[in-house]
Image (cartoon, rainbow, N blue to C red):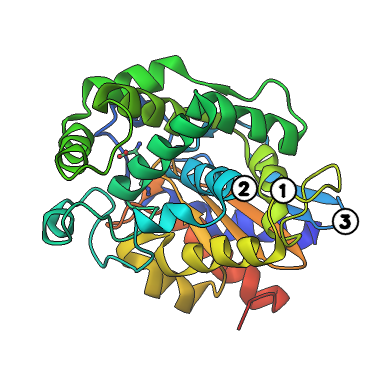
Amino acid sequence: MQGILDEIVGHVAPLCRQGEVASYIPSLGEVSPDKFGICVAMADGEIYGAGDWQEPFSIQSISKVFSLALVMSYDYDSIWRRVFREPSGTPFNSMIQLEADRGIPRNPFINAGALVVTDRLLTLTGDASVSIRGLLRLESGNPSVDIDAVVAASEADHGHRNASMAHLLASYGNLENSVDDVLASYFRQCALSMSCEDLAKASLFLARHGVAAGGTPFLSRNQSKRVNAVMLTCGTYDAAGEFAYRVGLPGKSGVGGGIVAIVPGRCSITVWGPSLGPNGNSMAGIAALDEFTARTGWSIF
Ligand code: DON
């Protein structure tokens, strides 16, 4: 395994200069495109990593997996009355379908859907980003996982599009909390900073059919199946078909350049390469996962 990861890091290095580092959140634009890390956390606890796998980065939309899992853990299925679970075929920050669908977002991973999930988590816990941070600290075993206040402020300063979506959701009665509170929570959860190692460990419950780090059930087997299914169909937005074709695993990306992929029953894999393709997914990261599943044969297909 270690040899495979070391070779993958060497193979994808030339891709790190293709695409572009996200700059619509200005503080993300300061990260070097040459960074690349990969980590595999096995269901039995073994960890393998290569490249910049222990360097923290902004997890951004990967946080949406954990907010959804937390809401489902508290509230089983009721979130699905407020958000669909169909691929959107539109960019992660598109609002086109939101009005046509009368304020019900197409899935929980596009920004509009994630705002609804965060809203629900805010109601259930009183502080959505702190509850996500708590889960991530517990599952990663790293108590220093934290929210990068500079990134959160940077996004809030440039958050007109998310603010528009939140207001549109509110106009349809699909927010329980104030627009300002939902946006603040959402920006803070996206600004959580974690390494590939932290994230691979923290997402391992999805490879262990819902069983958390301490061996206790966090999600039921069925709920874990459902989160993975939504990751497969919606986790990489309008590139979900391409991701399924190349990687063959449930996956969730973020504009910080991270991607988490799950091999149910076996392992979780995290990659990080800040330079993004046109759909907002790490180019080097997808290439690395493509090579990983091709070489190991570990795919759901
Ligand atoms: O709301 C946003 O635009 C960002 N905080 C997160 C977007 C994101 O990560 C999309 N992922 N590829």
**Rendered image: mark on residue 93:** none
Question: Toward the viewer: 162 or 19?
Answer: 162
Above/below status of 202 relative to 229: above
The mark that comes first in sequence, 3 or 1, is: 3
Q: At 64% across and 76% down in the image, what residue appears?
A: 299
Q: Which residue has dot 1 on it? A: 218
Q: Which amino acid type is marked by label 1?
A: Phe
- Which mark's residue is nearer the viewer, 3 or 1? 1
| Relative image position of residue 52 (x, y in whole percent) | 63, 38
- Which mark's residue is nearer the viewer, 3 or 2? 2
Q: Which residue has dot 3 on it? A: 44
Q: In the shown orientation, is residue 226 left or right of residue 24?
A: right
* Pointer 1 with pointer 2, Cβ within 8 A: yes
Q: At 43% across and 25% down in the image, what residue appears?
A: 188
Question: Toward the viewer: 42 or 9?
Answer: 42
Q: Which residue has dot 2 on it? A: 73
Above/below status of 140 relative to 261: above
Disc tally is 3
Does residue 267 show up?
Answer: yes
Does residue 282 show up?
Answer: no
| Relative image position of residue 37 (x, y in whole percent) | 61, 45
The mark that comes first in sequence, 1 or 2, is: 2
Q: At 43% across and 33% down in the image, what residue appears?
A: 190
Q: In the shown orientation, is residue 163 left or right of residue 261?
A: left
Disc 3 versus disc 1: distance between alpha carbons?
Answer: 17 Å
Q: In the shown orientation, is residue 277 left or right of residue 57?
A: left
Q: At 28% across and 47% down in the image, what residue appears?
A: 112
Q: Which amino acid type is marked by label 2?
A: Ser
Q: In the shown orientation, is residue 139 left or right of residue 107?
A: right
Pick the quarter of the image with the N terminus.
bottom right
Disc 1 versus disc 2: distance between alpha carbons?
Answer: 7 Å
Q: Residues within 10 Å of mark 3 (few under 14, many from 20)?
A: few
